Amino acid sequence: MTLLRRSVDARRQRAARRARPGPLADFLAVPGPDRATPVHDLPLLAVDIETTGLDPATDRVLSVGWVPLDGDRVVLAGAGHLLVGDGGEVGRSATVHGITDDAVAGGRPLEEVLGALLGALAGRALLAHFARVETGFLGAACTRLWGAGLPVEVVDTFELERRALGGGWDAASDPGALRLWAARARRGLPVYRAHEALTDALACAELYLAQRAELEAAAPPETTTTLRHVVA
């Protein structure tokens, strides 16, 4: 067990002591996957959110999409997509994601949306592309609603792509080379409409499977690729 894993466990224990009864406490009562879990057995939940901006302190979650992965299998039957209706306006962010004020007016309360997400995430690691957006907004929302953040193992396809290209933004041919759709294009994956939460979650899941295949192909034959090899 690694030092970082102990840190995740310690944060889960602290969060469990602080969390008020509800979906977050229920989520924290289910252990996450151990870092020694082989990736072929690893339960993941690919998650994407659409928001009014990039600052969890001032911007809002508008929609959440997710799809489970069990090893090599994308479990479409477990996918979910919910709009958040909180009475606020979408503003100029509609030009990015296409979500209108009328659409979110028919959405569900944030507490209900996050409750459904946390139920799907229990026992899994979170998979996302540039995951700090998801973890930042979801952690801030959990703190507001239930008094504690969201400690969870994170696999970030952005970080895996950065490793694949041998560095950071400067290692790529242009600043967009690490983006989700550029990473998919390099592997011949299909082009989908961007900035729709469920579609982006599925796109992330497919990219991860392609990245993982490359990682395993490059590993020594006696090496078993585990969660500790892909975690952010």
Image: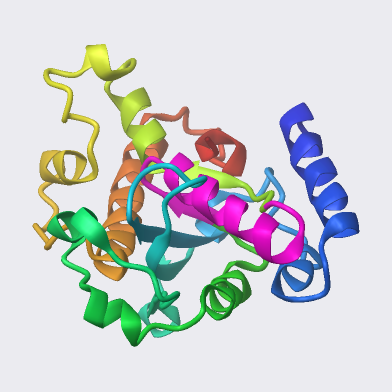
Question: Please, what is the dominant secondary structure of the magenta stretch?
Answer: helix
Q: Is residue 76 above or below residue 160?
A: below
By what rule are the colours in the image chosen? rainbow
Q: Quadrant of the N terminus?
A: top right
Q: Is residue 115 left or right of residue 172?
A: right
Answer above or below: position of 217 versus 72.
above
- Tell me where residue 153 appears, x and y as whole percent: 62, 47
For this rendering, which residue is in front, 3 or 20? 20
Q: Residue at x 17, y 29 (%)?
A: 177
Residue at x-position 58% and y-position 43%: 226
Q: Which residue: 45% across, 74% down?
A: 86
**Residue 27's x, y, as percent?**
72, 68
In depth, the one of 225 and 69 nearer the eye is: 69
Q: Residue at x 59, y 67 (%)?
A: 121
Q: Can residue 231 be found in the magenta stretch?
A: no
- Read off the magenta span: 126-149
Q: Is residue 187 placed above or below 86 in the rendered structure?
A: above
Q: Is residue 31 left or right of residue 86?
A: right
Residue 214, compared with residue 116, is above or below; it is: above
Residue farthest along the right direction in this orientation:
17
Observer-nearest of 157 and 15: 15
Does the magenta segment cover residue 146?
Answer: yes
- In the foreground, 39 or 28: 28
Q: Quadrant of residue 160?
A: top left
Residue 101, quarter of the rendered image:
bottom left
Q: Is residue 137 visible?
A: yes
Residue 179 picture quarter: top left
Q: Position of residue 141 (x, y in %)?
A: 59, 58
> Left or right of 105: which side holds 155?
right
